[in-house]
Amino acid sequence: MAEAIALIGCKGRTQEADHLAVLSTAMPEERIVPFRLMDDAERAAAQVAIVANPDPAEVAALPNLVWVQSLWAGVERLVGAFDRPLPIVRLVDREMARTMAEAVLAWTYYLQRDMPIYARQQRAGIWRPHPYRKPADTTVGVLGLGALGVAAADRLLGAGFRVVGWSRSPKSVPGLEAEHGLEALPAMLARCDILVCLVPLTTETRGLVNAERLAALKPGAALINFARGPIVVTADLIAALDSGHLAHAVLDVFETEPLPAEDTLWSHPGVTVLPHVSGPTDLPSAGATVAANLRDFRRTGQPPQGIDKSRGY
Ligand code: NAP
């Protein structure tokens, strides 16, 4: 049997046991050992680490790693975390894309069917219908046309919404109108009734959704942030909500997670808070994806395609 694979970053023993059970079932030919249980010889020999939002110091404590497989799609905490050119392979998984697309559609309906307004009205005992807006008359902008953004856009198109996507480089997605680059952003935002954020957190996207970009949205537009908290400037978001320019924000991700109890976002009437649940890792599916990557590595000696660290994703 080859050297042990390190498992790093599980939250607590229960999650660690769950991860071990699923990963070991997906690749019975491998021996997967939690970092905390590895002895010095195992740490020295490990070539591969499977990580879930790990402490980078634990990854750095494995001197002979050849690559790191993340169980998360977002790996911003690992970019620049190591002093050697270690390939970081993020999770690209069909089940995660399906779940995220489902969440984008669900929360788009929540906004399009005015659910936050009716929930407020119910609390105040107000019986007041609002005009219905068809999906075909609702434009949803999707920032980021990667594995998750394309799946989300596709699902929205299938439900009859008008969709315009945005990415860094030009993209051709059948049936989807796609823009790219910062120059195209203001005109794209000006068309959006709902803006969905699905770009990775990088030095370029930190603070991307700021006062200027929020102001460029249609009056009464809404925001869904399912990517990472620091992509949206919270103070600018609250100002846009308070001014009435933005009708509502659905936030699944935050600068600090869990969202601190004293944070004003909890009680802002224009904000729906979700506890980072829009695109959870589906362990059995992720296990199969990781097992396929490992088998390729054992066969060829080549690590899978890692992220481009100069781009940050
Ligand atoms: P991905 O496949 O790497 O796609 C990223 C997309 O963003 C690409 O289309 C890329 O453009 C675009 N992009 C990156 N930087 C940009 C910039 N500066 N300007 C314009 N577009 C830019 O990533 P993914 O798998 O779709 O995941 C996206 C993010 O979702 C993850 O990084 C993670 O943070 C987040 N996420 C959240 C959850 C959750 O539960 N809340 C779950 C999973 C993932 P190009 O096409 O030109 O490269």
Image: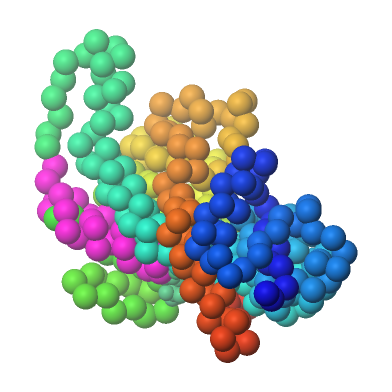
Q: Is residue 12 magenta?
A: no
Q: Residue at x 79, y 73 (%)?
A: 45
* Residue 294 place in picture, x, y as percent: 56, 75
Whether residue 83 is visible, yes or no, is: no
* Residue 98 place in picture, x, y as percent: 33, 57
Horizontal side of residue 108 vs 302, given as left or right? left
Q: Is residue 135 magenta?
A: yes
Answer above or below: position of 199 versus 16: below
Q: Residue at x 78, y 52 (%)?
A: 36
How is colour applied across the structure in the image? rainbow
Answer above or below: position of 256 versus 198: above
Horizontal side of residue 274 vs 33, given as left or right? left
**Magenta highlight range:** 133-159
Answer above or below: position of 77 versus 300: above
Counting labels gives: 0
The image quarter containing residue 54 is bottom right
Pick whichever, 273 or 2, lies toward us.
2
* Residue 263 place in picture, x, y as percent: 59, 30
Rendered-image quadrant of the C terminus? bottom right
Pick whichever, 174 or 195, lies toward us.
174
Q: Residue at x 60, y 37 (%)?
A: 258
